[in-house]
Image (cartoon, rainbow, N blue to C red):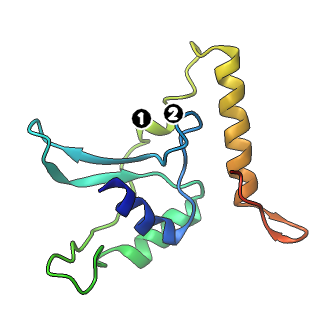
Amino acid sequence: DEEEVAQHFAKCGPLQVDPLSDQPYLKLYRDSDGKRKGDGLVVYVRREAMENAIVLLDEAPLRPGTKEPAVLHVERASKQPPMATMRTREDMSETMKRAVQVRRAQQEQAVSWNEEGLGTDPG
């Protein structure tokens, strides 16, 4: 499920979070019957996290030591995911734009260095 995949990929760095729903930008593609197609999309806050995931998680099992380990292939997306830009449209209200700005600033702070070390949890 999405939560399991998010936890697995978060090992390599923080995932981009939707500023309104506070859920990771994560998509597991499904067919018209609702069955998983076997591919998906995960969006990281930092490029370095994506690069880590490609190196560390490619061909690694999602559930090691189980009957169905679900070995994953990890690669860079071929184009910008629509989820990563869906909250930046011009038609958003000023309140919505400000909420998005605040949440993105919190995410940036969470992964940045400060005098005490890593940033603090934005939650």
Check residue 16 in the rendering and tell me which mark sits there, or answer none.
none
Do residues under tags 1 and 2 come within 8 Å of each other at their CB atoms? Answer: yes
Spot the residue most to the bottom: 65
- Could you tell me which residue is drawn at 49 percent across and 45 percent down? 23
The residue at the far left in this view is 33
Instruction: Place residue 55 in its image quadrant.
Output: bottom left
- Label 1 residue SS: helix
Q: Is residue 11 left or right of residue 65?
A: right
- Would residue 98 appear left or right of 13 to someone viewing this image? right
Rate crowding at label 2 as few (under 14), some (14 to 19) or many (20 or more) other CA atoms within 10 Å.
Answer: few
Q: Residue 50 location in percent, x, y?
A: 49, 63
Determine the CA span between mark 1 and mark 2: 6 Å
Query: Does residue 95 sit above or below 35 in this rendering?
Result: above
Instruction: Residue 76: give x, y in percent of width and height.
Output: 40, 58
Name the residue that disc number 1 marks: 82
User: Residue 58's x, y, as percent?
Assistant: 34, 74
Callout 1 environment at 10 Å: few (<14), some (14 to 19), or many (20+)? Answer: few
Q: Residue at x 11, y 35 (%)?
A: 32
Front one among 28 and 66: 66
State left or right for residue 61 relative to residue 6. left
Q: Which residue is mark 2?
A: 85
- Horizontal and vertical percent position of residue 93: 64, 14
